[in-house]
Image (cartoon, rainbow, N blue to C red):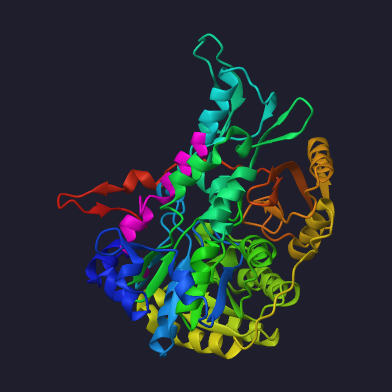
Amino acid sequence: MNDIEIAKSVTLDKITKVAEKFGILEDDLIPYGKYKAKVDAQLMKKLQNKENGKLILVTSINPTPLGEGKTTISIGLSDGLNRLGKKSVLALREPSLGPVFGMKGGATGGGYAQVAPMDEINLHFTGDIHSITAANNLISAMIDNHLYFGNKLKFKKVIWKRCMDLNDRALREVQVGLSQEKNIVPRKDGFDITVASEIMAVMCLSNDLKDFERRVGNITIGFNEENEPIKVSDLKAQGAVTALMKDAMYPNIVQTLEHNLAFIHGGPFANIAHGCNSVMATKMALKLGDFVVTEAGFGADLGAEKFVDIKCRKSGLKPSVAVCVATLKALKYHGGLDVKECTSENIEALENGIENLLKHVDNIKNQYGIEVVVAINKFVSDTEKEIDFLSNRLKEAGVELSLAEVWAKGGEGALDLAEKVMKNAQKETIQFVYEEEDDIQTKIEKIATKIYGAEGVEYSEEAIKEIENIEKLGYQKYPVCIAKTQYSFSDDAKNLQCKEPFKIHVSEIILKTGAEFVVVKTGKIFTMPGLPRVPAAEDIYVDENGEIVGIF
């Protein structure tokens, strides 16, 4: 059976029953049908004196184009911990429609390690991302309306973009205001994918609705003739944006196929945004479980670094242990094989690709200061010879390894991983890659050299000017959020092995005063992705029984 057939074969519990098992009463829920609900934010006040559980971070090596199964491992691990008698809760990101209809597919796990209902979660879910799209575009509409009625704020440059939650490269740059009406102001604009919107980042980093409104009011949307920032609060738009986002701010809960609790709330990409689910959902989960399994997007060079340097720095969260997910096919991919060749046995490619894994493990342990267990997401094409070789090689390097078979066995396939995670989750320690007091270039260069292994950083003239302006405005203490390809430690998606010395090339710097970080665009990264030659959308349809088919 494929993922969607497996998901449909399991009879789900009502979400009220799942919630009650983990200490959430029906009065604390806002139901979205039988199997989805939002949790009233007031629950945190009821739980504020309850001790936190232990936080487990799931990250990975640099992935192949289809990903390495972080979400599948996260779900299987949480189910495995519950099988061992521990209360384990998931805290994951919401899927974006871009990958669902693009190349990567859905983000609800796979096989018998899924969250459900998978088709609903992967599509509209509870409407959070649509709310973000509307809130983002309300700001755009109010900017252009302000320009139409005389530009009292004296906008010289608008930096705020529209957004939509689909991959559409044709919208990266557009012209607006072309109707030739009197007073209409034509200008260059563009679209980001919704998950890269600053509204998404603000939602995920806010502590509550009031904090969200404060941050939205602080968002910089442009600059005036004196090069001073113009904020959302100058447009008086923060109240309406907050009204649109009120329901979206409540964390969502669903269940695993083994009827365990999963928070799914917020979904920024890690290659172009900060890659972590909401602080509100994570903190609520920590009050309800002995363990909370959360994930950070893409590899540990992107998601895990931002988890540490942005989310943990701002929220005070500290993981007790990290799991670094890898697959044999990805290791061979980073060892020089074409992705189509990675299902064939090849010890030489495996040996070459191990260097990628070892670099990530070293970063997690020695740069982020977190204990780490490596989880190999097992595929049927993996051979005993390859598994033995990898196990021995990692043992020589002092790295703990667990072979996870969660796709085929669910939580049962993660029992060994769960035991090793519990054994290593004895302390909460964390190290930041850079200091808050470091200037922006120092922060970028510390990440580039320490985490990526680059020999340095090159900046465009425009990026240097933007850094100087940001520091002149007094925002140099903000963390940096580096937008970089997920496929390589470098900013070149084709440079998988990084054998030769390389530099990181910074093309643009974008100030995010609501999210309270600085986005650093490198290489050929786009905040609006495009569809592949053969998009997944071609195989998705509704069958004669009204069931959605083709999401993977």
Q: Nearer the viewer, residue 460 or 5?
A: 460
Vertical placement of 218 versus 379: above or below?
above
| Residue 119 part of the magenta segment | yes
Residue 244 falls within the magenta-colored stretch: no
On-image quarter of the C terminus? bottom left
Q: As drawn, is 538 to the left or to the right of 167?
A: left
Quadrant location of the N terminus? bottom left
Determine the residue located farthest toward the left in the rendered image: 545
Q: Main secondary structure of the magenta part?
A: helix
Q: Quadrant of residue 75?
A: bottom left
Please report the bounds of the magenta region as a residue range.
114-138
- Compared with residue 326, is residue 505 higher up or lower down, i.e. above or below? above
What is the x, y in percent for residue 500? 79, 58
User: Is 175 located above or below residue 8 in the figure?
Assistant: above
Q: Residue at x 59, y 86 (%)?
A: 425
Using the rendered image of the protein, determine whether residue 3 is visible from the camera's viewpoint: yes
Pinpoint residue 294: horizontal percent, then vertical percent. 52, 70
Q: Horizontally, is 9 left or right of 223 in the view?
A: left
Q: Position of residue 42 (x, y in %)?
A: 44, 66
| Image location (x, y in percent) of residue 307 | 63, 65
Name the residue located 77 percent from the left edge and 46 percent from the top edge. 505
Is residue 343 visible in the rendered structure shown here?
no
Name the residue located 57 percent from the left edge and 57 percent from the top edge. Answer: 206
Q: Is residue 103 left or right of residue 357?
A: left
At horizontal 39% and vertical 48% (from top left) the residue drawn is 536
What number of labels is visible?
0
Judged left or right of residue 26, residue 348 is right
